[in-house]
Image: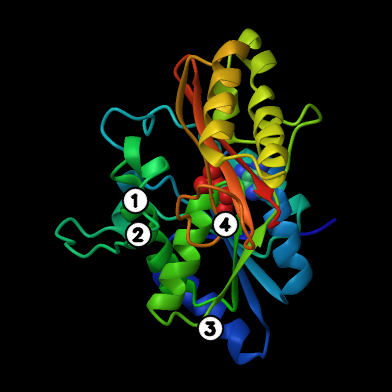
Amino acid sequence: MTAAPEIVRSVAALRERVGAWRRAGFTVGLVPTMGALHDGHLSLVAQARAECDRMVTTIFVNPTQFAPHEDFAQYPRGEAADVAKLQGAQCDLVFAPESGEMYRPDATTAVRVGGLSEGLCAVTRPHFFQGVATVVTKLLLQALPDRAYFGEKDYQQLQVVTRLARDLDIPVQIVGVPTVREADGLAMSSRNLYLSPEERKVAPTLYRVLQAAARRAESGAPVAAVEAEARDALLAAGFDKVDYLEIRDAVTLAPLTQVGDRPARAIAAAYLGKTRLIDNVAVAAR
Ligand code: AMP
């Protein structure tokens, strides 16, 4: 049986371990997470495992990406269970810092990614991408991996992270990993734990509606009409509120009136009760 991964809690220890690997000529993969690990996270670990000689998973519930009214306090935490899953996935090292290790009390520097960090999730979570961009930049500079793995499930985040690595010349390859779903199509998410049994039954509709919207947009239907119909379909299925459902350029996330010769993405956030679910699907170029 594989040994349990070593857990380090300081940036110095992380740098020491990864530095030794690099001096030995090993390539290093990084998988940043907020813990409460499920098979979606583990597919990122598996891909890093397959493509890199050594890999690090980080577990840090990042306070700066939550607004005061959001679920930071109740976000699911369970390090022992997470580490057991990571052992099964043959992760080499876990970096699980305390908040004080990541943020000095008088820190004043933040990373803001223009354009991509506006619209979609940022409309209702205006603080979110600056928190994500700052913590991901710190993790990339702390670990200096060859590759870092992020899920397509958080599609806008994946584009933001790809852009910040490019714009800041961080020498890392950002790798996007396809969304892992439950058997009924619901994208796996730590927040699915919040759903009541009734809400859980409605939840997979988000994926089905996005797929239907993607097929309609690919057939040349005007994007505004496709979006409006899809929003109505979510409400009719039992969603309480649709934050957004939009078809955007897959790379720039620019709004579209019609799908053209570039790939697009149907992307949505919607509420079941108090739980906000996000998902997205690919829309082929025409
Ligand atoms: P989180 O712990 O929610 O911050 O997620 C950590 C990483 O896992 C992010 O890169 C997510 O996009 C990715 N991830 C979360 N859920 C899934 C999923 N269902 N499939 C693939 N990747 C996922």
Residue contact between numbered discs 3 and 2, judged by CB atoms under 8 Å: no
Residue carrying label 4: 250
Q: Position of residue 121 (x, y in %)?
A: 41, 41
Q: Nearer the viewer, residue 184 or 214?
A: 214
Of pointers 3 and 2, the one earlier in the residue sequence:
3
Confirm whether residue 34 shows in the render.
no
Residue carrying label 1: 118
Image position of 213 with respect to 218: above or below: above
The N terminus: image quadrant: bottom right
Q: Which residue is depicted at the point 31% across and 54% down?
A: 130
Alpha carbon separation for disc pair 1 and 2: 5 Å
Q: Position of residue 190 (x, y in %)?
A: 57, 34
The C terminus: image quadrant: bottom right
Q: Which residue is depicted at the point 35% across and 46% down?
A: 128
Residue carrying label 2: 115
Image position of 218 with respect to 145: above or below: above
Alpha carbon separation for disc pair 1 and 3: 36 Å
Instruction: For mark 1, give the secondary structure.
Output: loop
> Mark 1: few, some, or many residues within 10 Å (few <14, many ≥20)?
some
Of pointers 4 and 3, the one earlier in the residue sequence:
3
Instruction: For mark 2, give the secondary structure.
Output: loop
Alpha carbon separation for disc pair 4 and 1: 15 Å
Q: Which residue is depicted at the point 30% across and 64% down?
A: 111
Residue type at mark 1?
Answer: Glu
Residue type at mark 3?
Answer: Gly
Confirm whether residue 261 shows in the render.
yes
- Which colour assignment does the render follow? rainbow
> Mark 3: few, some, or many residues within 10 Å (few <14, many ≥20)?
some
Of pointers 2 and 4, the one earlier in the residue sequence:
2
Residue carrying label 3: 19
